[in-house]
Image: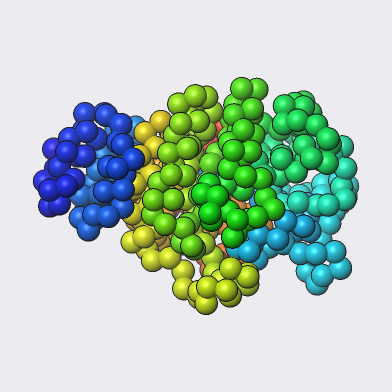
Amino acid sequence: MISVRDPQLQPLAAKVYDGQRLSFEEGLTLYQTRDLNTLMRLANYVRNERHGDDTYFVHSLRFSQTNICYVGCTFCSFAKRFGEEGAWDWSVAESVEWVREHYQPGLTEIHISSGHHPKRPFSYYPQLVAALRDNFPGVQIKAWTAAEIHHFAKIARSDYHRVLRELKDAGLVALPGGGAEIFSERVRRKIARNKVDANGWLEVHRTAHEMGIRSNATMLYGHIETLAERLDHMERLRKLQDETGGFMSFIPLSFQPWGNNLAQNLGKTEFTTGLDDLRNLAIARLYLDNFPHIKGYWATLTAPLAQVSLDWGVSDIDGTLIAESIVTSAGASSGRALSKEQLARYISDAGRVPVERDALYNVIRRYEAVS
């Protein structure tokens, strides 16, 4: 049992060591405490109990077949309109060629997220998955957020099950976790009015899990949400995970304040602070007791802070992120890719064991030592 400076954390620490679930009110206490050292040590305890020093990453290519989108999320710096400078919209053949140009030996995962294209028929999307599967055998396709699946169901005039069934039959193995933003309806009305609502997002993942499609979950923070709304977001995810067990990781994503309407309206030019990022990760590790992994997404944290986060509950730092374009369009300065060797060194230098995984957390290689 560690020493605790904040007396309000004493009963919470006892529950953590006893493996008991924290209540919503106790989660708020974690957000309000100034005893960040205790918060870090509790999160690190849970992380070490689950994973020891093992820290995961994936050799991943980030691909967006289009950045054309009609939704108009105010926080987004990625989306374009038809004819706008910098817009792209690729056919299946063009998409395959783009992936071929960026392919690297040993690539494990193609991670796809993109815009809500107003004109593409749904048939385009299973055709794209099948073409990538056939042209890059052995590479797993993790594709399209719940918001995009909701869009596909609308244009197909169908339901989530049929859409996901066709994509799975074409070769889809998992869903990324984007599109969640913050579940609070107050916030969604202001930042993502035209996107799937919280219940729809959760229902897509519930349906995917029932079909054996595993997924991740995200949370966008650091804009207009309250701390209670952050915790409410985690609470809803925890309840769904109790029901399905289909989530692999939770990824908090800090708001990137460049080139979007939300930043301009708020007059916001500063990124979240490192301590806010670390606190958020630690609370996620303690509160989401049924999630296998908390991911420290190095593209928004920066790689050095991702190293530090390994002591704050994080057991995964994502991956190589070849050709990442979404967060970099909003000002993330970490760069668009790291090699497997660089990621392994970052993890090893932090005193942890690098473990290369696939999209479903199957182990590919353990790096016992990185010199």
Is residue 53 in view from this perspective?
Answer: no
**Viewer-side residue, 292 vs 361:** 292
**Viewer-side residue, 147 vs 265:** 265
Q: Is residue 309 positioned above or below 216 on the image?
A: below
* Picture quarter with the N terminus: top left
Q: Is residue 174 positioned above or below 260 on the image?
A: above
Q: Position of residue 240 (x, y in %)?
A: 50, 30
- Quadrant housing residue 322: bottom right
Q: Residue at x 72, y 31 (%)?
A: 160
Marker count (numbered): 0
Q: Position of residue 73 (x, y in %)?
A: 66, 59
**Viewer-side residue, 366 vs 126:** 126
Q: Residue at x 83, y 41 (%)?
A: 155
Tell me which colouring the rendered structure shows.
rainbow
Is residue 137 in view from this perspective?
Answer: yes
Q: Position of residue 24 (x, y in %)?
A: 34, 40
Q: Residue at x 81, y 61 (%)?
A: 88
Q: Is residue 290 positioned above or below 43 on the image?
A: above
Left-right relation of 129 to 241: right
Q: Position of residue 245 (x, y in %)?
A: 50, 26
- Quadrant housing residue 110: top right
Left-right relation of 170 to 51: right
